[in-house]
Image (cartoon, rainbow, N blue to C red):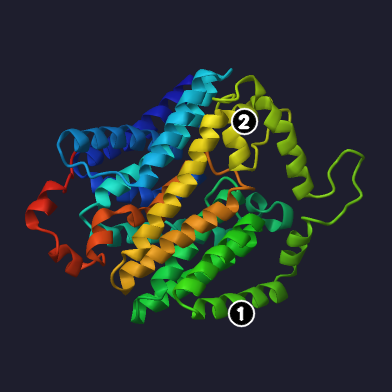
Amino acid sequence: MAVNAGLCVWSASLPAAALGVLAVTRFEWFVLLVLAVRPSLDILGVGGLGPGAMLATVFVATAALWLIVQYRSGHWQPMSLAAKCLVAFGGATVLSVVTSSLRVISATGALEIVAGISMFLVLEQLLANRPDRVRRLLLAVLLSGIVPVIVGVNQWIGADVASARSDLSRIQGTFVHPNPFATYLVMLILLSTSLVTVVAGRQRLMLLCYLAVLGLMLVVTYNRASWIAVIVGLTYIGVTWNRRILAVMGLGLVIVVLAVPSVGARIGDLSEEKALPEGVPDNSLEWRIQYWEKLVPLANDSPLTGIGPQVVLHTRPERVEPHNIYVQAYVEMGAFGLVALGAVVVGIGITLSRRRRAAVGSFDQALAVGAIAVSLAVLAQSPSENLLNQTMSWWYMAACSTWGFSRLVRSHGTAGAESRRSVPARSRRASHGESP
């Protein structure tokens, strides 16, 4: 057993070392590689020695080093309001570890959140004064969905039905659960939708086919919060950018309801009363409300800093996370955490609104609209999903919206060659920052 564990650690350390070398020599490509492969890793194993956890550890270490070097070398770009609020929330999360009764577990939970926030900070600095990098970032994000979608389709057609199916045959792709898979799909759908309005020819056809498969996968995750989130995001894109999106969305909803009766059954489960034992909630919504009522008083012993990240999951008899990021922030990170989380919501909203008002050109405007749509979708999911400790969800929200923080994109227009020519050569060389 010890030999097997040693071999596992050794085999996992080699890719980690290779990633570390790449991060030191070509940091931008390291970040793009992280984003391109991360959704495919959980199928190889999860936990402390899982490749996903090890990748997050390598990323946090190298990102911290790179950010420090950027700051000390004079290449640091002023932080946006959104980034400052995210740093404040990260600080409140770390502070809550001090008052935790399970400090090791809480430290791990805080690291998951800090790892997610660090992607926002890294991408903001990478994209500042280099809008050409946005296109490479977009490609990495879109490519990241290929393996999860292939696995999901394979599960859906029954080739891997034994491991994929649970209630209502919910599909999870390469993810550990259908819910985070659905959250990821929502962000890819909204990103692809914003892009399909500004590309043409073969690129548009490929994106439309990709969107069709992503939509199918989202339906068969049977995650209701993600269904609502994607409707919110698509509605925003349709109302503010391209009205045809509303017509296509309406037609798609009709087709789904008629062709997939189980969708209606899944929605009806929110309010349908069932013959259950006394004391058991009639539906999932009622259960969640009752659970939140039990959790909120737990913060009374430490109302400012909370009981510590992930303590609810490891101490409550239900062994279930809060299913609400605001309840989780208050209970586990206290009033400091809840206020900081509220500041994050407001800060991102203000930053992206400014970004959209300053957008120049159709491509840049589409990106700005897509970034807001993704943020609205995540906001729609936040009252019912466990998003705070999903590092991957943080990463792809950052990848789908952080260009909205970039100072040069706001100031100089589109993320193409024309925009690059508007940047003085000396400024481009100074902000290159390939190596930490």
Q: Is residue 323 above or below residue 256?
A: above
Q: Quadrant of the rendered structure where residue 144 is?
A: bottom left
Residue drawn at x 33%, y 38% is: 15
Asked if residue 244 is positioned above or below residue 355 in the image, the reply reads: below
Q: Residue at x 25, y 40 (%)?
A: 23
Asked whether residue 345 is in view, the answer is: yes
Q: Quadrant of residue 17?
A: top left
Is 223 located above or below residue 198 in the figure? Answer: above
For mark 2, what is the residue? 331
The three-letter code of the residue at mark 1 reads: Leu
Report crowding for label 2: few under 14, some 14 to 19, many 20 or more residues within 10 A (C-alpha). many
| Residue 67 locus on image (x, y percent) | 26, 37
Image quarter of the C terminus: top left
> What mark, if any, has residue 251 been given in the picture?
1
Structural crowding at the residue carrying mark 1, measured as other residues with C-alpha within 10 Å and reported as few (<14), some (14–19) or many (≥20): few
Q: Nearer the viewer, residue 100 or 146?
A: 100
Sequence-wise, which precedes: disc 1 or disc 2? 1
Q: Position of residue 415 (x, y in %)?
A: 26, 64
> Quadrant of residue 155 in the image?
bottom right
